[in-house]
Structure formats: structure tokens, C-alpha cells
Image (tube, rainbow, N blue to C red):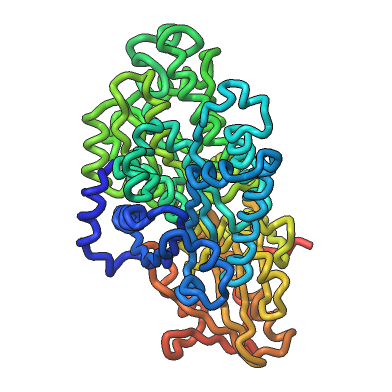
Amino acid sequence: MKNFLQLKKNLKKDFSNLKSVKLAVLGDTATQFLAQALRGLGHDHGLNLNIWEADFSQIERQIFDPNSELYGFEPEIVVIFRASHKLLGKYNTLEQKKHSYLAQDELAAVENLYSQIDAQLGAKVIYFNYAEIDDAVFGNYSNKTESSFLFQLRKLNYELMLLASRMSNLYICDLSSVQNQLGKSTLFQPALYINTEMVLSVDALPAVASRTLDLVATMNGKFKKCIILDLDNTTWGGIIGDDDLENIQIGSLGIGKAFSEFQYWVKKLKDRGVIIAVCSKNTESVAKEPFEKHPDMVLRLEDISVFMANWDNKADNIRQIQRILNIGFDSMVFLDDNPFERNLVRENIPEICVPELPEDPTEYLEFLYGLNLFETVSFSSEDASRTKLYQIEAERAKSFQKFTNEEDFLKNLNMVSKVESFNKFNTPRVAQLSQRSNQFNLRTMRYSEADVEKMAQSPEYATFTFTLEDKFGDNGLICVIILKKEDKKVLFIDTWFMSCRVLKRGMEHFVLNTLAQYAREQGFDSLMGEYLPTPKNGIVKNHYSNLGFKDRDSHFLLDVKNYEPKKSYIAEKK
């Protein structure tokens, strides 16, 4: 991780070609160095953070004044930092009988701040939770004393999590965890605070900025989707080809415990929706043997989406994994104990994240915890089934090879799609797919659940979701369309994004047939589309032209009155 001076040097770099994000920073202590660290680190995340910083201790004035500079700036994301030391100062001045209500009152204040921002801006809010301060008035007994400051602070942090779970545009930046990792003496330096009102030390700023940027980057579609595992001395101890099945190190004894706990972590990532792949220099049958036969293995073959074990170059194998999964290299993490293999992959695929694992396997997990590689801003029921979806996709790929032409293959799939408007059941998936879709995304719009709910209720929009199911299995919700009623004659395709898992199935034709039929039935003459290029969505550059739209001054128009439905092998599921 870069130190603060290195992040400041980033401020001199060229930001012009990076994605621009408007970010407001408000704090009840000095935040100017935090703002600099955020912008500097933003460059490393491929983001041009346009930051507006409120004056010192102006949170309430800026948020509750509808004519304030905050609302004039119109940020996409608002970062709010209210320090534990200010909270302690407030507690100290309260009447003793009010000590037990501190958390309750502060939570109400946070909810008011969020609600005002949501009503005025609809912006996402990142709120720092509270780093712990034990004022040692009650000692350990503070955990049994509701009126103690430590009890109230911990209660407040817990209640903040519950509040964020109810408010879809409110996200908690876990400053308390950062303090646990760095140590309080690193996060907070008393002399600095007394003399400058800076609660966060210069040494802690990179870690705090990193945890904040993890959220900001994920909100803008930059996050990790896949973890690729080496096997020997990474997933288990020893070399399976030399040591044999019974002698590899996993289980509850000795160093094997470290590898088993590592596997439990990977398993939890899989259950959360992260794709697990294997890339190992081994004979495939030998490499698979522990997954199939070892009683202490936590991971099994059904947890692995793509299994590559051979004696080829690992960079080439990872390229093959990427082709199968159809995701960007920058959304992959490769874990390998061997420095030579790590460097080879870094040099050949610079976009991929290759952490420098410690030499000691007992340190793997704590090291990886600190990197926070798999930040997310959403979670849906479909995440847990993602591995199965990719395994089914591999079956489809094998089936395709049996056919002499694509048309026969598509007919044989027996595809059906359910078409629905946004509703309370599909809202989480719609929001999540908007965050995850980078390649097949015509305008790269990002939506929270709150955004989705607002559009669903607005007469200004028509919303569509599409599922796709075939004889191999159900892909779930894979495409989202949002139409905006520009005028009485034109429907603007505000959003069209789709999972790359279903490319080359004719889904685009089925979707356009549905939209054209809707437009005609509602009395519209035209559909208007727009393509906004990004570094990742080049595959849809000619999307509208290929579908028969006419180029009109940077937009694309389709006459729906004379539209002839496209050939599609997908039937609508009733």
C-alpha cells in the first residue's frame, strides 16, 4: 500500500482519461488530507474523483440547507465522517441521566442526515462508523453498563449496520475494523488531534482511503468477481504429485489447519457469489484427486467453476479461464505461493490482481483479510448459485460442439424467457446487475435499489426484466431495459445491459421484439438508443446498427411502426 506522500504524488498525474465521479466529503474534524488521499488513490483505481470538501464541522448546515454548496455541487456520492472523539465530547457534556440515550439520539441524527440527502440528491452516502474509545471509567464493567460510553458507542455501531440494511443508498465504511488492523496508536495520535483537529493520522490515511475507495470503486463497477487458485502449497500443503493423497497437509492438525481455514474462506466467497477457478501445474486427474477423495478437503469439485490443471504456462491457462468465464482480467484475483509464477502472470497479464502472498501459509488469511479484495455493495439470492450457472455454461459449450451450425444449436436449447417489470422481488438483482455489467452495457448506468424502486414507481419510465432458461438450466435474471418517455412519439432506451453469460443466444432479438411491440401498443413511433463508450463496452459499439437502428446525430432511431420482428429461438414464458 502506498504511503500518504506517494498518494500526494499521484495528484500530479493525468486524470483526464479516467472515469469521473463527483464526491463530497463532510466531517466534524479536519478532512483536507483525507480528501487528498482519496483523490490520489482514486487514480490507482482508474477514477477521477472530483472532490468537493465542506468547511470544518459544517455537516448539518450543508445537509439541511437546500441552498448550500453541497447541493450546488450535486455529488454522486457523499462521504460523512463524524469522529468518535467528537462523540465522546458530546457524551461528556450530557446530563448523566441522558448517557443511556446517546446511541439512540445519534442514530436518529444519522437517519435524518441520510433522509435529507436522499430526498434532495438521491446520492449514495458513505458513513464512517466509530473507532472505539474506552474511556476506562467503568473498566470491563462498561460492557454491562448501558450508560457507559463504550456501551453506547458499540450499540451505535451495531444500530448503524441495521439502519444501513434498511436504507439502500446508505453504506458503512468500517473505520472500526481499520483501527483493529492498524492499532489505535497508528490510527489516532493525540498531539496531532489537539493541535490540528485531525483525528486520522497521516500514517493511517492510506488505509482509511483504501477502505473508502473500495466502496466507491465497487459502486462504479470496479470489483473482483473471480478468485483463481494454485493448488500445491496454496490450497493444501505439499505437492500432490510427489507426496500422494494421504500426505498432503490439510485438516485440524499442524500446518494443515492453516490450509483448511484458507479453504473455508474460499468456500464462503463462493457462497457469496465469487467465482472459484483452479490453475495448477499438475496432471488433471492427480490434481482432482484431493477434491474427490480426501476426507479433510473443504472445497469440492462442485465448488469450482473452471478447473485448469496441466503443464502449460499459467498465464496462458488464465487466459483460457477468462475466455470461458467471459469476464475482464481486472475482475480476477490469482493466488499462488510461488514468486516465479506470480511474476510471470503479472508480466503477461498486467490487469490481473496478484497479491504477494506471505512465505508462511499461517499468515495467508490475515494478509488477505487486510486487502479487502472482494468488496461488494449488493447481495442477492442468485449469488449463491453463480458457480452452478458457470458449470452449466460449460455444458452448453460442450453441447455446441456437436452441432454443425448455430441455428440448430439454438433450436435445440428450448429457450424461454420471462418478461416482467421491476418489482420488490427482482429489485435487488436489477441493482446488482447494473453494478456488475461492464461489457454489455450501452450507457453504463449504475443503480442502487432505491434508484430502481423510484423508477418502478415513476410514470416517466417503462421497465423490463428478462430471465433466460433452457434445457440445461435457469440463468435467472440476465437482462434489464429502462425506457424513458421522451415525448409522445419517442421512447428513449435509457438503459440496456445484459449478462455476458448469455451472449450469442439471440437474446438481443427477443428483447428488441418485446420493446417494439410495447412501443407500438403504447402509441409511440420510435425507439431511440444511445451508445456511451467506456474502456470495457466496445463489444456493443455496433449494437444498435446491427439491430437495424439508423444513426441520427449521435443517437440511433428505430421506426417501430414498420418494424419486422427479428428471428428468435426464445419463447416468452407465461
Q: Closest to the observer: 20 or 351?
A: 20
Residue 319 placement: quadrant: top left
Q: Which residue is at a point 26% across and 39% down the rendered structure image?
A: 345
Residue 412 in view here = no
Q: Closest to the observer: 403 or 537?
A: 537
- Which quarter of the figure is the N terminus placed in? top left
Image-based side of 53 in relation to 339, left or right:
right
Does 513 appear above or below 216?
Answer: below
How many numbered circles does the render carry? 0
Residue 573 image position (x, y, % from top left):
75, 61
Q: Which residue is at a point 26% across and 47% down the rendered structure image?
A: 4
Residue 168 image position (x, y, % from top left):
63, 56
Residue 532 in view here = yes
Residue 70 image position (x, y, % from top left):
48, 70
Q: Which residue is at a point 30% across and 44% down the rendered structure image?
A: 202
Does 334 appear above or below 508?
Answer: above
